Image (tube, rainbow, N blue to C red):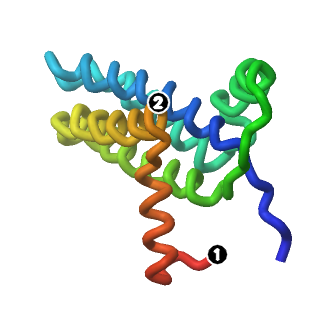
Amino acid sequence: MSEIKRIDPRGPRFGAAVTAVLSLIAFGTSWESYLQGAPWILALFVLFAWSVFAPASHPYAFIFKKLVRPRLAAPKELEDPRPPQFAQKVGFSFAILGVIGVFFVPVLIPVSAAFIFLASFLNAAFGLCLGCQMYLGLRRLGVIRS
């Protein structure tokens, strides 16, 4: 079994901060009319899909590696990338819920945006990754094997 390449935990937190802003805009614009939030929830869907299917080329990763990380001190510790990757899949599922809202049930747009905002804000502001905690819990239960 090969060694897992560990990541700088500030990268996912940076992505969470950007996601928090976008999801707050999606929520805020859908308050007056659900469909005004549609472009924002679709953008979040694309960004989450990108992070799940091609994380190495994701714009957040590029911006963090090229513009943010060079200005920071070396990280105190590195982390396993699997919990944040699982968290991205959870976020992607909420973005899918929002896309279903765009086409079928518009009230799902602000609902999904609110859940995405809550999770991304907690990660960005406090380092509390809800999806990562779900991953660890499911792993302890044996649902996820590594």
Residue 35 location (% of width, % of height) = 23, 23
Image position, residue 110 (x, y; %): 23, 32
Residue drawn at x 42%, y 62% as measured from the top left: 134
Residue 29 is marked as none
- Looking at this view, is 2 or 137 the one in front? 137
* Quadrant occupied by the C terminus: bottom right
Verify CB contact (< 8 Å) between mark 2 and mark 1: no
Task: Tell me if 76 is positioned left or right of 106 in this view.
Answer: right
Q: Which residue is mark 1?
A: 146
* Disc 2 from disc 1: Cα separation: 27 Å
Quarter of the picture holding the N terminus: bottom right
Residue pointed to by mark 2 = 19
Identified at 60% across, 43% down, the residue is 51
The residue positioned 26% from the left and 17% from the top of the image is 29
Question: Height in image: 4 above or below 138?
Answer: above
Between 54 and 73, the residue placed more toward the observer is: 73
Crowdedness near tag 2: few (<14), some (14–19) or many (≥20) residues, C-alpha within 10 Å: many
Q: Sequence-wise, which precedes: disc 2 or disc 1?
A: 2
